[in-house]
Image (cartoon, rainbow, N blue to C red):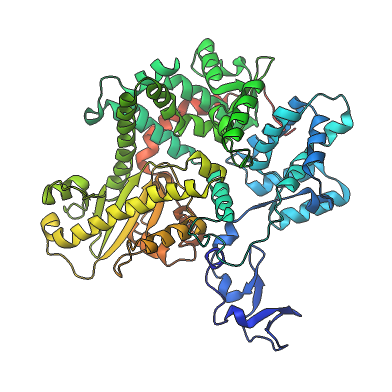
Amino acid sequence: MEALTGDPLPGIAPTFTSGFLDGRLRFAGSGLPVLAPTWVESPSGLILPAEATRGPAPIDQVEVYTTLEELLGVRVDATTLLFALQRNTFSNVINFCTNWLVLHARIDIDWRTVDELYVAQYFVGPTKIRAEHLVRRGRHLVAPQILLLLIKLAMFYAETSDDEQNLQATPLLPFMLADTLVSDREFEDGDLFIQKDGLPTQFALEIISNHHFNAPLDIAHMTSRFTRRWIEMPTEEKFKQEKPLPDLFSETTGITLDELTSVALTIWAFSQQRNQNIFTLNDFAGAGIEIDRAHAVLKFLSASRSALKDLVMEDHEAFEFRGAEWSFSAFERFPLLAMEDGSFVLLSPRLLINRVFGWLPYWDIASPLRARTESRFKEFDRYFRNLSEAYVLEVLHSMSPPLAGERRIYSEADLYRLIGKRQGVKIVDASIDYGDAWVVLDVSTRQLNRESVAGVSADALVKDYTALAIEKAKQIESTIGLLKRHERELTGHTAKTHRTYIPVVVAAEGFPVNPVMTSLIEAALIDQKLLQGDDITPIQIISGVELEMIESIQENGGPSFAQLLLDKAKGNLGKSSMRDYLLLERRLRATRPKRLDRIFDERFRRVIDLMSGSSSRSGSTEPA
């Protein structure tokens, strides 16, 4: 629990205390009060000494959804939920869920405001009072996971009904579903995260699945990285190949990257400005794309109800009907639902942006290549991952320019030139000289596999963090040893004594970094005796987005990359993500780096024009 709450109670051994009486903590076996600082309620609801609540704690970042039992005092089971769905209409449930998913994804409205809108629209009397109280206590009424899971269930169970009373009960469906997800499991004594055999506990799996699902979405970073990786970098001399990526994508999918991004950004723009969740071909008349080509993209991104049902069932059968609450791969692949009337329902703006600007376009090319020939697939895979790593190094060079004419970044090739290629010796992608410290950094394009995303396999999760962190730690430790032996030859200057080595893995595609994942990785590193030297700080895993946040902080005169890494290791949120540390603990302002301005502005100029002229367009404007 200490990993979630921060430091243990200062000066008090937990085994000697038993609980509160009249608001005061007592010693176990006696009525004597503990002489301690003032006790206060933390944002997470825990009662802690005021001293222990200075600064944020990891548990304060945990968000909790609301159940029907909390809202109405009545708990329902799965049978009751499915009966309610069968007495509803599919179109009504889909429109309700997607309306609120669109509103929840608005970048100009915070989540609490969305919850308050839900209360105002649907509840009256005592239920409204209870709902308002829950919102004030930080409980969420609108939870994207619940809404997407409700859509999955509706595809199988929602029927047709003309009974208005059944339809009026729709706003209660998410809370009924939440009731069925509540676990009555009691945790055994021992570590919450790690079993005795070293594998993650089920609780750890669920926390990581939750974090992965709710990871922040940065559309500026995603669109800019997409443009560099897919369009600009392949035209540069060192990355040129016989068939450029845009041509390869078009040949494989039948649509162009420009057509794909134009349609996606048009949908996103209207969802942001108008809460629009249903689209027809008329919506793309001003998108700078022919209507027939827009239709081709919409068909590429969509699937019918029956097709999605089949994909969802395949997914569940693959996991032996476990992990349904976290597995949305069918919706990730097809974020639009094709309706019988020719319209398209946006299931989730977040899923759409990830589908177009994330890693999935890679699979649009990779899957057909792999089906034809393994060698062509491996060639493409190696090329694309090299582009991804090169983009990260581009960010590093932007944020670590030469200082007083002296270079600061040394590449893998620089060290290999010193020692030559040796069997079994692996070197990291970049080592950055900060005078009294080295940041020793390697890039990974590893992502969670499907089993880890769904939270159904401890072995799969171990495989994921071993590949991303433990194997990279071996490269980092090898490189640290080389730096210690060859620093003068590498830099041309006398090696300084008392250097600190800061190991970093940049997860280019993101990775769920939280106290659970950090604890699992630290335990594995200790077990394998990796990066345990006194002059080596705890390993930090940061995403490509977080690296660009640091880039912008440095542009605005903030602390250096090395200093932020050193400070974070000692902070309250040392085991949490770099994003949480920067924004919540350090309260630093992270804007878009200047390097991205040109790309972002060019990519969004068309979207801005669309949004400014969209006031008369069709589409939903209010939540259902």
Q: Residue at x 27, y 51 (%)?
A: 400
**At which x and y percent is residue 154?**
72, 31
Q: Quadrant of the N terminus?
A: bottom right
**At which x and y percent is residue 485?**
15, 61
| Number of numbered labels in the structure image | 0
Q: Residue at x 77, y 52 (%)?
A: 132
Q: Nearer the viewer, residue 127 or 471?
A: 471
**At which x and y percent is residue 527?**
39, 63
Quick check: 328 above or below 235? below
Corner quadrant of residue 2: bottom right
Q: Which residue is drawn at 21% across and 49% down?
A: 424
Corner quadrant of residue 343: top right
Residue 586 appears in the picture as rendered: yes
Q: Is residue 380 left or right of residue 120?
A: left
Q: Is residue 257 left or right of residue 125?
A: left
Q: In this view, does 180 lie to the left or right of 260?
A: right
The single residue placed furthest to the front in the displayed view is 197
Q: Which residue is drawn at 72% across and 34% down?
A: 623
**At which x and y percent is residue 226?**
40, 32
Q: Nearer the viewer, residue 157 or 509?
A: 157
Residue 550 appears in the picture as rendered: no
Quick check: 320 above or below 495? above
Q: Nearer the viewer, residue 526 or 566?
A: 526
Q: Is residue 573 left or right of residue 433?
A: right
Q: Quadrant of the C terminus?
A: top right
